[in-house]
Amino acid sequence: MTDREKNIMQAYDALAPDEKKLFSVSNVNHLAWSLVIVLVLLLGWFAAALVNAENQRHALMTRQCQDRVFKEEVDKTCLLNVRSREHWWQHVSYALSHLSPSR
């Protein structure tokens, strides 16, 4: 191969695409981020369930939902709509700090 042919081949090689950069490769681990999102949604769902359960438990303990006619019974519609504490975070903090039932 002569010098002239070598120069022409180098010129054509410079026009060829770089195969390392030809395909875009994502460095983001989609499986890990999907798992993080699913776990955050699951944690939010558990927190909402915890707030609801603690709200109803506190309403039952403080007798906020007694039936007006039968004093020993519970008014179930009241139990579904009661707000036994001011804020939802009070339910969460009480539930997380009192893990076993009081005796």
Image: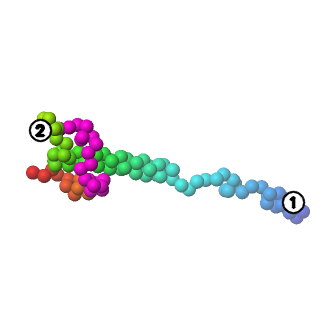
User: Which of the two discs, 2 and 1, labels the residue nearer the N terminus?
Assistant: 1
Q: Secondary structure at mark 2?
A: loop
Vertical arrangement, residue 27 with respect to residue 60, above or below: below
Q: Residue at x 20, y 37 (%)?
A: 75
SS of the residue under disc 1: helix
Image point (58%, 54%), residue name: 26
- Residue that badge 2 annotates: 71
Q: Where's residue 66, x and y in %?
A: 16, 41
In this rendering, which labeled residue sits more in front, label 2 or label 1?
A: 2
Which dot marks residue 8?
1
Say which residue appears at 23% left-offset and 56% top-offset.
94
Viewer can see residue 47: yes
Can residue 53 be seen from the camera position used here? no
The quadrant the N terminus occupies is bottom right
Which percent across, then down, holds residue 31? Answer: 48, 49
In the image, residue 33 lies at what x, y percent? 47, 52
Residue range corresponding to the magenta coloring: 71-92
Residue 56 vertical placement versus 85 (above, below): above
Q: Which residue is at the front of the view, 90 or 81?
A: 81
